[in-house]
Image: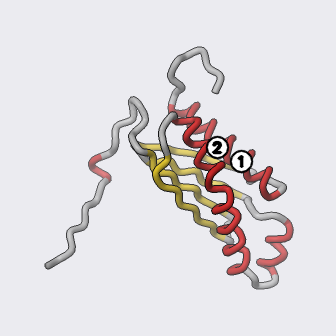
Amino acid sequence: MTSLRETPTPGEVNASISNGIVKLLSEYVGRGPTKARTIHDGKIVVCVLEDTMTKAERSLTTAGEEDYVIRVRYAIQQIMRHDLTAVVEDCTDRKVVAFMSANHIEPDLAAEVFVLDEPLPGVAEVASGESRYAPSP
């Protein structure tokens, strides 16, 4: 990240993560999504990608093979796991302790979710948004 400030702004961190993930997807599958938006709060980083499918994947979904496309997408994202995690770790200076990935066919969306080992500086976790479930005895 190139910045005159020592600490990047939250927006700069988010933009760097989005750009890194789009670049990786382009390298792995031949094209990247047309839109990407990353948000973070506390230890959670989420990148939502739009228009992710290749021409071949669109053809498969038109032929009714949505489940196959989802399985292949999941496999690719697992292969990319290390590189995706590295992007987030480089941009946040935090260790990623969990990575989850999901895809949706219509609309064409994907989500990459990362959990960091500790919150980013200056970003407090939102206590009011937490839910704790205690099962009944």
Q: Can you give x and y, in whole percent of width and height, for residue 131 in the image?
A: 28, 59
On screen, residue 75 above or below 88: below
Which quarter of the rendered picture does the N terminus lie within? Answer: top right
Depth check, front residue: 76 or 19 = 76
Q: Which residue is denoted by mark 2 in the rendering?
A: 18
Q: Can you give x and y, in whole percent of width and height, for residue 59 in the image?
A: 84, 75
Q: Can you give x and y, in whole percent of width and height, for residue 32 in the image?
A: 77, 52
Report the number of discs.
Answer: 2
Please tell me which residue is depicted at 45% across the width and 46% down the height of the picture. Answer: 116
On screen, residue 82 above or below 40: below
- The part of the image, by quadrant, that contains residue 91 is top right
Q: Amino acid at mark 2?
A: Ser
Q: Are marks 2 and 1 in contact (CB under 8 Å)?
A: yes
Q: Amino acid at mark 1?
A: Val
Depth check, front residue: 14 or 97 = 97
Label 2 crowd bin: few (<14), some (14–19), many (20+), radius 10 Å = many
Please tell me which residue is depicted at 65% across the width and 55% down the height of the picture. Answer: 49
Residue 47 relative to residue 40: left or right: right
Disc 2 element: helix
